Amino acid sequence: MAISYESIISSAPFKFLVGPEKRPFVIHAALVAHYSKPLDVLVNGKMSEAIEGCAYLDDVDEDTFVRFGQYLYTGDYSEAGQEDLSDYPVVFGDVAPVDVWEWSSNRNRVPASPGSKKSEMWRKFQSTSYPTSTPASHPHRSFEISAPALLSHPRLYAFAEKYDIPPLKNHCLHKLHRTLSAFTLHEDNVGDIVKLLQYSYEATPDHEGGELDGLRQLVTNYAACVVEQLSRDKLFQGLLEDGGQFARDIVQQMVKETE
């Protein structure tokens, strides 16, 4: 159920002190309470935080909290280094997958053969969708993006997971999926993808059977599409050698795709 603007602007402001520096941020209490039950208890409950109208969140960085506030008020958020949300529009269709390439020594890329297993895996990944209120209606194009920009999505996802905000989790998955679908992967930025994989698994709980967490499923599916490129990177090799849940998940995903 949507919340009215009148309810938002007539509610009291609530101050959050964020990160080790306790930087102050103010958000309307009604808006926070509408999106998150745990935060509703914090701002409207009987604890000292609700009485004082102030809470300290030491487990979130400032940039992530800014994106959280941006989402509350606008329904969207900017990734790191992206001030204009229209900078990197992308839709999906019958476009050559920019990530499914064979590398040559001079970084020229040759697209995978149409109908190949690799191409089909990519098209399956590309066609995945996540419920979100943000439309994508612009031409597909590739772009360069930094590691901080990639990580801004799983960091906000982890925040939304902790404070029980399902719509924001879906929106983070939508934006990360859109970014990865247009990401130009090459030797110089493979490490950025490895950092994304590492953080996504560190920030989400292990599972015992059953379905993967949404973030883990997304990044594992992507990694399976470009595993040949990733496998040449020493950091990725180390990630596999460490074993753990990711190593098991990527193997299971590869087996599933070859069945």
Image (tube, helix red, strand yellow):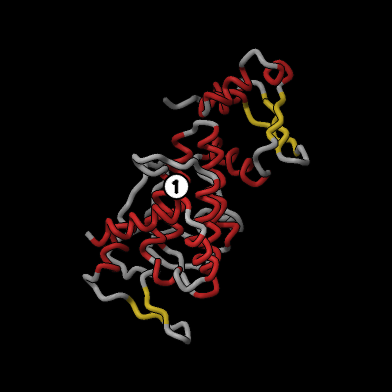
2 shown above or below 222: above
Q: Name the residue under label 1.
A: 215
Residue placed at 54% from the left, 31% from the top? 163
Q: For the residue marked with disc 1, what is the amino acid?
A: Leu
5 shown above or below 243: above
67 shown above or below 116: above
Question: Residue 82 sits in which quadrant?
Answer: bottom right
Q: Which of 192 and 84 is in front in this view?
A: 192
Say which quadrant the N terminus sits in.
Answer: top left
Residue placed at 46% from the left, 70% from the top? 185
Question: Residue 147 sits in which quadrant?
Answer: bottom right
Question: Residue 142 sits in which quadrant?
Answer: bottom left
Q: Nearer the viewer, residue 247 or 1?
A: 247
Residue placed at 42% from the left, 63% from the top? 182
Could you tell me which secondary element the residue under label 1 belongs to?
helix
The residue furthest right is 21
Residue placed at 46% from the left, 40% from the top? 169
Q: Nearer the viewer, residue 86 or 186?
A: 186
